[in-house]
Amino acid sequence: MSLTAISSTPSGGRSSGDGGLNLGYSRTIPGLLKIGQLLSLLVAFLCVRLARGWPNWYAFQFFEVVLLWFLVAFLIFFLMHLCRLQVKMPCINWPLAEFFHYFVGSVLIFIASIIAAVKCGAVSSLVVASVFGLIATFLMVVNLWTSYSVACGPVAGEQE
């Protein structure tokens, strides 16, 4: 049985301090981007997995491995933000780790999506998988751009 401290807010409501889930994160721009990435990677993975007759086995095996790896990694980052784990583990530079992972992920998923688009052999589910891979790449680049502008933006109060 876990115990949490409950405090009263000035408006009469109750809050649980640092514990619990941060469900409001899923309604922010970075949260929505992560949900979009997860959904597009999941759709791409399912399209590749359920396709019959891969024209090029090695290309789609690579595509499938890259999709699954980054789907799990982005799910971990999303759950990390929902559970506020970055506050509980301050020894890791989370913005830098996330930036590096999004950079590597966007490059690898872009390469895998291009290879999948070239080698699809007019199999419609593989074409859809490569399109969703490219959509995931676009969402990762947008997330990379926003996290870079937050992590490396100008310092407040600094004159140019």
Image (cartoon, rainbow, N blue to C red):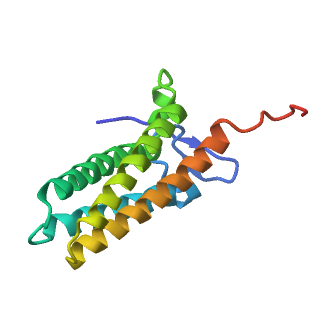
**Vertical order, 111 against 124 (above or below):** above
Say which residue appears at 33% left-offset and 35% top-offset: 2
Whether residue 26 appears in this view of the structure is no
Q: Nearer the viewer, residue 62 or 85?
A: 62
Say which residue appears at 44% left-offset and 35% top-offset: 85
Left or right of 3, for residue 56: left
Q: Nearer the viewer, residue 84 or 54?
A: 54
Say which residue appears at 51% left-offset and 42% top-offset: 16
Q: Residue 68 appears at what percent x and percent y? A: 25, 51
**Vertical order, 83 against 96 (above or below):** below
Whether residue 49 appears in this view of the structure is yes
Q: Quadrant of the C terminus?
A: top right
Q: Residue 96 appears at what percent x and percent y? A: 52, 32
Left or right of 152, for residue 93: left
Q: Nearer the viewer, residue 100 or 1?
A: 100
Q: Residue 46 appears at what percent x and percent y? A: 21, 66
Say which residue appears at 51% left-offset and 40% top-offset: 6
Quarter where residue 154 is shown: top right
